[in-house]
């Protein structure tokens, strides 16, 4: 049997991302050096004012870690961090020299990327995309044999919504108007409350939309954004890149990763007392990495809190179709907020949606949107201006976002196959989530909350002191040490909890539920065997 | 005949973008308020350090123009600015009430968006995209009748380069390795010098790549970026959004928008004397909005200048296929730099390419890449990290970028039709450029440099004092006044020179050469008639 402490790769582990986040969470004071830069200051250097100086020509600076933007240096994104880099190296080694590791393939459970693990795309969606990419076949007789009738019809409808039927043209910077109409209608059907196509901004996946809002709201490190801990590291990365302050609130693991408004209040007040202006609250529902689904009453409290405190509610709702337990239902924050009578004047609300998640999992298409409500026309104009600098999001992603919000309906030729594909994927995801959750809870020292939604489990591991010491000895965080050993022994890639944030002194990892169902037994047995050996090695 | 001064729309003109840019160009000193924020300062607020304070709960700030990020407020993007908004309104009015304006359609000459004006996509490219979107038809017999054999073969090749053939999966954050291999081979074939696939970062069009480099290089307003004036306003917008200083260098209109290294030197020294650290030089070749193609000797001087001064050369080469005059050829800056013997250790070079331009004009697909050379492994790792935060660019755009750099070859089934489509578009663009250039030069008080490349003309207009006074009377910049009158009278949309920058006291506009060839005579006659009437109205 392999000895973990003799594993060179484990020894070498130095998971910087962990260290940074931990240092940040444990950093006990917040320095302010100088005021934020002035609004009125022009940064456009005047030509006419510049008299050439006869100064010497010192050796010019090249680009080094010392002279790049420190915000870039600071930002971390653990989901594609060093463990993934190691996994890619192991994969190459397996290709070059099969049998060189005690497993024959790498199982990427680090990222919500369903199709990379074999999930098939929804046929109807792909038919429409292909037809919109190459509309000149729409009229051909062979096309009838290759594509469903409703896909052909839908492609015509979409093309008719695009000026000149030009799918290769830049669109309106918010996205094609007709597609936004469709999406708004889909939101209305979901929520039972009106949605305005002018509130929709189509984006290349949800990430650019999150960046846009951070860019709008953050002026300096004195602006704070309330974020859950654990959180999806896009948020910490985006806040770092825009120079703001992440104000953490802990989700309560003991109550199934419950979101407690008392904790929000406490953290908001604490931030204020340190001179931080909190601008927004991020809520991820269903939760990433935690998988919980918020109850409606809880959501109501959150909305009221944001209204009272004048916070923008940034609602990450990209897993809205991923709910696996009968006792929970997804409710959008907009629906909840309208249900209690809050309108445009009461709360600034942004809902992020993506084609990358749900049962479609079209990550590579980079489609998504944000729906913004409650912002003044002047502020909306600024958001539009920023969108216009990048011209528009990709049209295939725009089309897919409209399809996701307006799938085939009863009576359409594709309806039955669409429902079959959808239900097949969602029920399989639910089974996989339950199997993995049970397997994790059977491990010594591991406890895992119920996977109510999203695509992840976030189990807690009680690591023996001996393991913690072994990690220290190789200059590693204990959870990163565990994850690296797991990868080296089994080929399973998970992300250490430190990449998402966790209560200091507790250790977790995030594991997706996405390996195909026929691989789940192997994941469970490899993980179980590994964990037993790890504990045998390190048990105190 | 309509009187311009009685035109209410013209009267109301207030082109803010112009005013800002002019103020910026004429701003005679550069203020610094406080040092840039410290590197070591943690912006992740510690939870454990935050004792709730019993402070009152003041009315929380909502989101207003006064409390959003001033960098957002400051940035401008004239290509989609207020004249375009007016054009969209006129278009709606024409739809609702045909005949309500003295023209029956809006002609968008404001933006390089060829397919929006009727240019057809390259068939082979769209065939491959459609097949990659819906690979399950690849095996079907009907597919042979609908698609060319080499498109089917290429789709298979591309799918085989994608792990699991999953076009719906996130890819490597730099883009699919096999596609980067293809692109690197295309660059090698173009330049005659090696290219490394690991130097390629695929992006959603070229704009995100430009933002990434600005984000990397700009630390504060004390970091400067040398940019041509006139420039493509993406650069000024990106520098503003990242809080840097645009250091302008004027292209010399008298020598066909020549780039003079003496001017670079002068501006660099002047910037240094004001405490600005210049990090990079932006060169757009072929030029936007100016249409000039740099000579090789000129490029050599530029490369030597960057090497000597330690500047990153940011080479916007998205119009590399758009050269219309036999006496000029496109040379990449990488080729020029390697030709004079400069290697990785000598110069940091970034080349931007896009699928939106060239003869393909696939703006809506949002494909592009940057090739980065000369950066240390540590800095490259930082660039990779920033790319990874956004996961990856859209896969269709990635595929298209590979196709653009590796089109059909002699002997392929599509080769003849591909060449026919390509030559048809490029020769038509050349004819349109010449016709418009001649027409502009025939106008009283207008002079227009030769359209050597890109997709634009940037004529200079000598406006009569009476017109300038009329513009002032409606609180408008003279060039914006002219463009707005042109739009109101003819439906032709062009962008005032002030959106790109121009020598103070001179007036220009940017006009694309993209209206379809059968519309060019109408553009010429409408423009000519308008200009005559305008001059008759305002001649001093």
Image (spheres, coloured by chain):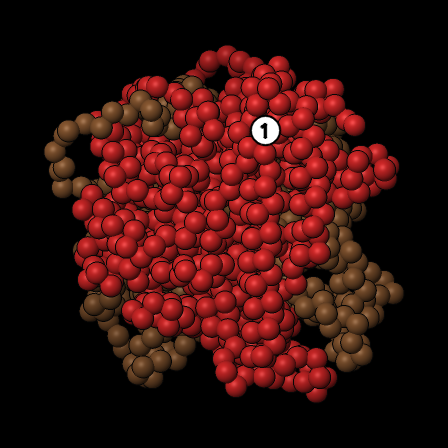
Chain colours: A red, B brown
Image location (x, y in percent) of residue A24:
42, 24
Q: Judge whether B494 appears above or below A253 on screen.
A: below
Question: In which quadrant is the C terminus of chain A drawn?
Answer: top right
- Residue shown at 47%/59% (left/top)? A325
Q: Is residue B180 above or below residue B81?
A: above
Residue A142 visible in this rendered orientation of the protein:
yes
Whole-percent x, y for residue A90 in the image? 75, 35
Q: Residue at x 45, y 22 (%)?
A: A23
- Where residue A277 appears, as percent x and y from the top left, is 25, 34
At label 1, counting other C-alpha atoms closer than 10 Å, the crowd grade (few under 14, some 14-19, many 20 or more) is: many
- Of A75 and A86, the residue lying toward us: A86
Number of disc labels: 1
Question: What residue is shown at x 65% (from left), y 59% (from top)?
Answer: A119
Report whether B466 appears left or right of B106: left
Question: Is residue A231 left or right of B6 when viewed as pictured?
Answer: right
Q: Nearer the viewer, residue B202 or B328?
A: B202
Q: Quadrant of the N terminus of chain A?
A: top right
Q: Quadrant of residue A177?
A: bottom left
Q: Which picture quadrant has residue B307?
A: top right
Which of the chains bears the disc numbered 1?
A
Vertical position of residue A111 compared to residue B40: above or below: below
Q: Is residue A348 above or below residue A159?
A: above
Q: Position of residue B151 (x, y in %)?
A: 77, 67
The residue singled out by tag 1 in the image is: A480
> Dot 1: what SS?
helix
For residue B282, say whether it is visible.
Answer: no
Which of the 4 image quadrants contains residue A279?
Answer: top left
- Residue in the image at 40% along x and 39% along y: A254
A58 and B131: which one is in front?
B131
Q: Judge from the rendering whether residue A522 lies leftward or rightward of residue A253; answer left or right.
A: right
């Amino acid at each position: 049997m392999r000895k973990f402490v003799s594993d060179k790769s484990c020894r070498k582990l130095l998971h910087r991302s962990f260290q940074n986040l931990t240092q940040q969470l444990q950093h006990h004071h917040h320095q302010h050096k100088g005021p934020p830069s002035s609004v009125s200051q022009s940064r456009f250097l005047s030509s006419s004012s510049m008299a050439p100086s006869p100064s010497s020509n010192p050796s010019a600076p090249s680009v080094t870690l010392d002279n790049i933007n420190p915000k870039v240096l600071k930002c971390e994104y653990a989901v594609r961090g060093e463990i993934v880099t190691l996994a890619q190296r192991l994969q190459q080694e397996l290709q070059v020299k099969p049998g060189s590791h005690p497993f024959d393939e790498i199982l990427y459970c680090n990222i919500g990327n369903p199709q990379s693990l074999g999930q098939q795309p929804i046929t109807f969606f792909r038919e429409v995309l292909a037809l919109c990419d190459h509309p000149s076949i729409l009229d051909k007789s062979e096309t009838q044999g290759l594509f469903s009738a409703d896909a052909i019809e839908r492609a015509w409808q979409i093309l008719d919504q695009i000026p000149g039927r030009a799918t290769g043209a830049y669109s309106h910077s918010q996205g094609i108007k007709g597609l936004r109409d469709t999406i708004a209608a889909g939101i209305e059907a979901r929520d039972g409350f009106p949605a305005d196509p002018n509130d929709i901004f189509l984006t290349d996946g949800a990430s650019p939309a999150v960046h846009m809002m951070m860019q709008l709201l953050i002026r300096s490190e004195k602006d704070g954004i309330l974020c859950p801990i654990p959180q999806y590291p896009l948020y910490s990365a985006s806040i770092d890149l825009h120079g703001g302050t992440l104000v953490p609130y802990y989700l309560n693991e003991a109550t199934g990763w419950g979101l407690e408004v008392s904790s929000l209040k406490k953290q908001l007040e604490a931030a204020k007392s340190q001179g931080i202006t909190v601008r927004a609250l991020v809520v991820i529902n269903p939760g990433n990495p935690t998988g919980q689904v918020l109850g409606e009453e809880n959501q109501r409290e959150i909305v009221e809190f944001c209204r009272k405190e004048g916070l923008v509610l940034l609602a990450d709702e990209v897993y809205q179709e991923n709910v696996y337990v009968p006792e929970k239902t997804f409710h959008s924050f907009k629906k909840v907020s309208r249900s209690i009578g809050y309108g445009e004047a009461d709360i600034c609300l942004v809902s992020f949606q993506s084609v990358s998640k749900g049962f479609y999992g079209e990550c590579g298409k980079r489609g998504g949107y944000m729906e913004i409500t409650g912002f003044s026309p002047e502020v909306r104009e600024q958001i539009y201006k920023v969108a216009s600098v990048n011209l528009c999001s990709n049209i295939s992603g725009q089309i897919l976002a409209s399809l996701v919000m307006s799938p085939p309906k009863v009576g359409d030729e594709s309806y039955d196959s669409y429902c079959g594909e959808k239900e097949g994927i969602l029920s399989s995801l639910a089974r996989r989530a339950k199997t993995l959750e049970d397997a994790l809870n059977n491990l010594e020292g591991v406890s895992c909350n119920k996977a109510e939604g999203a695509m992840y489990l976030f189990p807690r591991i009680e690591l023996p002191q001996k393991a913690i010491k072994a990690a220290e000895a190789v200059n590693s965080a204990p959870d990163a040490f565990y994850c690296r050993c797991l990868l080296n022994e089994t080929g399973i890639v998970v992300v250490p909890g430190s990449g998402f944030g966790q209560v200091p002194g507790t250790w977790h990892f995030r594991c997706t539920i996405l390996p195909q169902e026929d691989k789940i037994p192997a994941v469970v047995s490899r993980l179980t065997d590994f964990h037993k050996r790890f504990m045998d090695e390190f048990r105190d």
